[in-house]
Structures are given as structure tokens and as C-alpha cells.
Amino acid sequence: MSLISIVVPCYNEEEVLPLFYEEIQKIMEQMRQEHSHLTFELLFIDDGSKDKTLSILREMALKDSRVRYISFSRNFGKEAGMFAGLENATGDYVVVMDADLQHPPAFLPKMYNYVKDGEFDCATTRRVSRKGESKIRSAFARTFYKIMNKISQTEIVDGAQDFRFMTRQMVDSILSMKEYNRFSKGIFSWVGFKTQYIEYENVERAAGTTAWSFWGLFRYSLEGIFAFSTAPLALASLLGVISCLIAFVMCIVIIIKTLAFGDPVAGFPTIMCVMFFLGGLQLFCTGILGQYLSKTYLECKHRPVYLMRENEEIYRSRQDS
């Protein structure tokens, strides 16, 4: 028998969870009929939801022995949710997918077919369109992928999703990376392994609203840049060299104008412009250094990526007592 663990990070998904559960049951039954040796477990990660997500997961776990869940003590973010799911999944294969049905469960049989024979270690989806997204958000996403692939040695495919069907070997390799500041898109690429990309059109959420704001996505993109590239540090050094060259040239020009032509040097406006320029440049470069230093600081603390408050075993023991 082969066990497939389906990891589903959740944050305020009370509206869509029943729809997801109904849909995934159909797909699991379909795969069981085609491959009788397959068994499944559903591992939901409640990332400190403030709605009835946890209550729904409790009910599902009591009714269906295949359902497991982990509830965090607070909101730790999707990266922590995915890490917790991978860490606690027991399957021979592990799937990571969202609960909002933007990752269509209907792809699972096709993904399994790519991975089962050992030709591929991972099957994942790649959006070929961003239908339903705002133009600004789409343009920002495309720009991020272009920049990331130019400044990083780790290639991240444009449109690649976190929706992945992976072998146990690949999952164990991902878990061996114990860093606190996690950027899974980069980690999936960094560990390597042979990956098959399945292209599909963007799918709207089945219900509810996304928790990702533009500002949240922007911060997440910065996490990726600082986690998988040292190019910003090189940029800071380059700006410093350029500033020194400009200052040197300006000094030569001023000396020549003063000695050769007797041209008086402009006073207050020139000084203020130079001060603001150099001050801003210094703060910018210091900010880059500060970002890398802050990441190092958090890594050195060795804090856990997440803290569990409850799971299905704890809940069942409470009910029995």
C-alpha cells in the first residue's frame, strides 16, 4: 500500500472548507478505483484562524479517520503552515495545496501518474495566465520573477505554484533545510529533483476572500530576494563605488573652475543637494545591510518555525475524558 498525504494550510477558510472536502473526497475515491493500493490522509494546518475553521476541522476529524489537523497557537504564516504539514505528513507521497480550490484537486490523478514510476520526483502546476488578478499585481509578479532569476542562482519558474505532488525523498530534502526565514518557492527549486510542470489557466477562489494583500505579497517577495540572493549587498557596494567616483570627479571640476576660471563655487544649494543625496544613499545601503543582519539575528535565535496548540489526537482525548 502507498499512502498519499494531502497537506492543506488554512487561514480563515470556513466558507470554502466544506466545498474543498467534498471535492477532494471525489478525487480520492476516483484514484482509489484506478489504483487500489493507494490510501490517503488529509492533514489540515490551521494557521491561527479567527473564524470557525478549527471547529469545522474538529468535526471532520471526528467523522473521517483520514482527516488530521494541527492548530497553531497563533498565526505564523503560510510558510510555517507548509513546513508543519511536510514535517507531520507520514505518506510515501506528499501533496501541498490550498483549500480555496484555486489548486484544482482534479489535477491529482495526472500528477500521480507523473511521479509514480520514478521518472519525476515532483509534479507541480504553472499558471499560464493571471486572469482575475489586477494589472498592477500581475505586472509586479512578472517583474519579481524576472529580477529573481537574474540575481539568484536558484531558478524560479514564472507562474509556478505551491501546489505540488512530491516523493518522500524530496520532502525529506526540503525538511533538512531548517532555516527560520523560509521561502518555499526558492526551497523547492534549490533542492533540485526532477520536476514536471503542468500548465493551466488561473482559477478563482471558490468562496471567501484571499488573505494576501498587495503589501503582503511585496514583503513576501523581499523575503525571497534576501533568502536566495546576495545581489542587494553587491548593489550597495556598487553604489558606494559610484558615489566615490562622482565625488572625485566633482572635486576635480570644482578645483579647475576655481583656479582656471575664477568661477565661484555655489554654496548652500549645492551643499544641501549633496547632503541629501549622500544621506539617502547611506540610509539605503544601511537598510540593505540591516535586512540581512535581521535575518541572521532571527536564525541565531533558533526559534521554532511554529507552535502547536491542538491536533486531532488532543481533541479526541478531551472528548473522551
Image: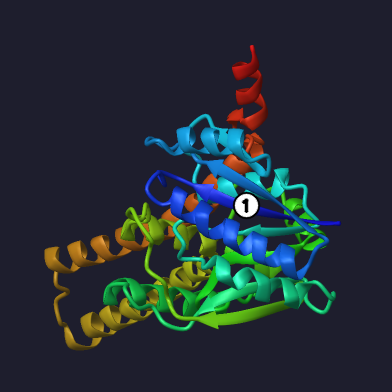
| Residue nearer the viewer, 223 or 217 | 217
Residue at numbered disc 1: 7
Q: Residue at x 52, y 45 (%)?
A: 294
Q: Which residue is drawn at 24% across and 82% down?
A: 259
Q: Is residue 299 visible?
A: yes
Q: Position of residue 224 (x, y in %)?
A: 53, 62
Q: Which residue is drawn at 44% across and 71% down?
A: 239
Q: How crowded is mark 1: few (under 14 residues within 10 Å), some or many (20 or more)?
A: many
| Residue nearer the viewer, 187 or 106 | 106
Q: Position of residue 312 (x, y in %)?
A: 63, 31
Q: Which residue is drawn at 66% across and 61% down?
A: 29
Q: Position of residue 24 (x, y in %)?
A: 57, 58
| Residue nearer the viewer, 106 or 63 | 63
Mark 1 residue element: strand
Q: Can residue 245 be seen in this view?
A: no
| Picture layout, residue 251 above or below residue 101 | below
Q: Residue furthest top?
A: 321
Type of amino acid under label 1: Val
